Image (cartoon, rainbow, N blue to C red):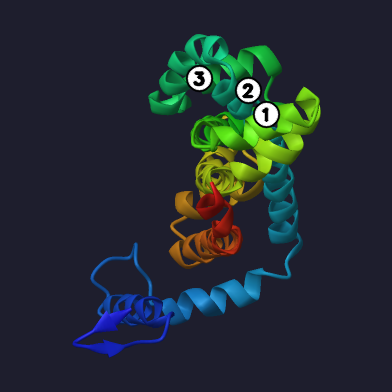
C-alpha cells in the first residue's frame, strides 16, 4: 500500500479501517456498530464457550465437506471440458447458468431432496464453490501449449498420465485461482445453508445474537468468519505466486 509516495506496511489498510470502526462506535451513532474494542473483548470472552466451539465445529465440518467436494469434482470436470470440445459445448451453458443464477433459490429444492440436515448444507456449499473452479480449470487447460500435449503423446503417455502430468500442472495457476474464489463463495454458501436449511453452527449464532440485539457478539462471530476466509484466501494466493512460473513455461 502506497500513500503520498510512501510505502506503508501491508496491514496498514486494516489498521485504518479498525481505527475508523472504533471512532464510529465510540460516537454511538447506531447500536448496530459497537466500538471495535468492545467487539474484541466480547470475542475473547465467547471463544472458549461450548456454544461457540460447537458452532465452529459444525461450520468447519460443512465448509470443509463442501469445498472438498467442489475441488474433487470441479477440477476434473473443468480439465475434461478444456480437453473435449463436445463436453465443453454440452456443459458450458449449464455451468454459466449456475454461476450467474441466484443459488439461494435452489435451497428449498435441496431441502425437499436431501432433508434439513448437514447433507443439504454441504451440498449448498458445494454449489456455491464448484462452478468457478470448473471455469478456471477449463481456461487453464485451454491455454496449455499444444507442444506439451504432442510431446506426451509421442512418448506414449496414457490419457490418465497426461491428465496428471501435463494438464493438471500446466493449468495449476488458474486452478488455484478458481479454488481461491470458490472458497470465498463457499463461505457465503455455508452461512446461507445454516440460516435457511438448519439453524446450526455460525448461522444459529447469527440468528440468536441479531434477534436479541447483541451486536457485539454478532460482530465477534463475523470477525472470526471473515478471519478464517481471509487466511485461507491469502494462503492460496501465496501458492498462486509460488507456481506462477508454470504459466510462464506455457
> Which residue ends up furthest to the bottom in the rendered image?
6
Residue 136 in the image: state x and y as whole percent: 51, 37
Which quarter of the image is occupied by the N terminus?
bottom left
> Which residue ends up furthest to the left in the rendered image?
4
Question: Which residue is at the front of the view, 151 or 129?
Answer: 151
Can residue 159 be seen in this snapshot?
A: yes
Say which mark, if any, is on residue 80.
Answer: 2
Q: Earlier in the sequence, mark 2 or mark 3?
A: 2
Proximity of marks 1 and 2: CB atoms separated by less than 8 Å: yes
Q: Quadrant of residue 110?
A: top right
Q: Nearer the viewer, mark 2 or mark 3?
A: 2
- Alpha carbons under labels 2 and 3: distance apart: 26 Å
Q: Name the residue at 75% across, 52% down.
A: 57
Q: Nearer the viewer, mark 3 or mark 1?
A: 1
- Alpha carbons under labels 3 and 1: distance apart: 24 Å
Q: Badge 2: few (under 14), some or many (20 or more) residues near its Cα, within 10 Å?
A: many
Q: Is disc 1 placed on a helix, strand or loop?
A: helix
Is 59 placed above or below 104 here?
A: below
Q: Is disc 2 placed on a helix, strand or loop?
A: helix
- Alpha carbons under labels 1 and 2: distance apart: 6 Å
Say which mark, if any, is on residue 76.
Answer: 1
Proximity of marks 2 and 3: CB atoms separated by less than 8 Å: no
Q: Earlier in the sequence, mark 3 or mark 1?
A: 1
Q: Name the residue at 54% across, 60% down.
A: 237
Residue 166 in the image: state x and y as whole percent: 69, 38
Is 81 placed above or below 125 here?
A: above
Question: Which residue is at the front of the view, 134 or 36?
Answer: 134
Q: Name the residue at 73% across, 66% down.
A: 49
Circle 3 sits on which residue? 106
Amino acid at each position: 500500500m502506497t500513500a503520498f509516495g510512501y510505502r506503508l506496511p501491508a496491514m496498514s489498510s486494516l489498521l485504518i479501517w479498525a481505527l475508523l470502526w472504533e471512532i464510529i462506535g465510540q460516537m454511538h451513532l447506531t447500536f448496530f456498530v459497537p466500538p471495535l474494542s468492545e467487539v474484541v473483548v466480547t470475542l475473547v470472552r465467547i471463544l472458549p464457550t461450548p456454544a461457540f466451539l460447537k458452532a465452529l465445529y459444525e461450520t468447519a465440518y460443512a465448509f470443509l465437506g463442501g469445498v472438498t467436494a467442489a475441488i474433487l469434482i470441479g477440477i476434473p470436470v473443468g480439465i475434461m471440458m478444456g480437453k473435449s470440445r463436445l463436453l465443453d459445448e454440452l456443459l458450458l451453458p449449464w455451468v454459466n447458468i449456475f454461476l450467474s443464477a441466484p443459488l439461494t433459490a435452489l435451497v428449498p429444492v435441496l431441502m425437499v431432496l436431501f432433508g434439513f440436515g448437514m447433507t443439504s448444507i454441504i451440498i449448498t456449499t458445494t454449489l456455491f464453490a464448484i462452478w468457478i473452479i470448473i471455469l478456471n480449470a477449463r481456461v487453464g487447460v485451454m491455454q496449455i501449449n499444444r507442444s506439451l500435449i504432442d510431446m506426451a503423446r509421442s512418448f506414449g503417455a496414457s490419457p490418465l498420465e497426461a491428465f496428471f502430468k501435463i494438464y493438471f500442472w500446466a493449468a495449476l495457476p488458474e486452478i488455484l485461482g478458481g479454488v481461491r474464489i470458490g472458497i470465498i463463495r463457499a463461505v457465503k454458501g455455508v452461512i446461507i445453508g445454516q440460516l435457511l436449511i438448519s439453524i446450526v453452527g455460525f448461522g444459529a449464532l447469527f440468528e440468536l445474537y441479531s434477534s436479541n440485539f447483541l451486536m457485539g457478539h454478532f460482530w465477534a462471530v463475523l470477525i472470526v468468519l471473515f478471519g478464517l476466509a481471509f487466511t485461507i484466501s491469502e494462503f492460496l494466493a501465496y501458492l498462486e505466486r509460488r507456481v506462477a512460473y508454470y504459466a510462464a513455461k506455457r
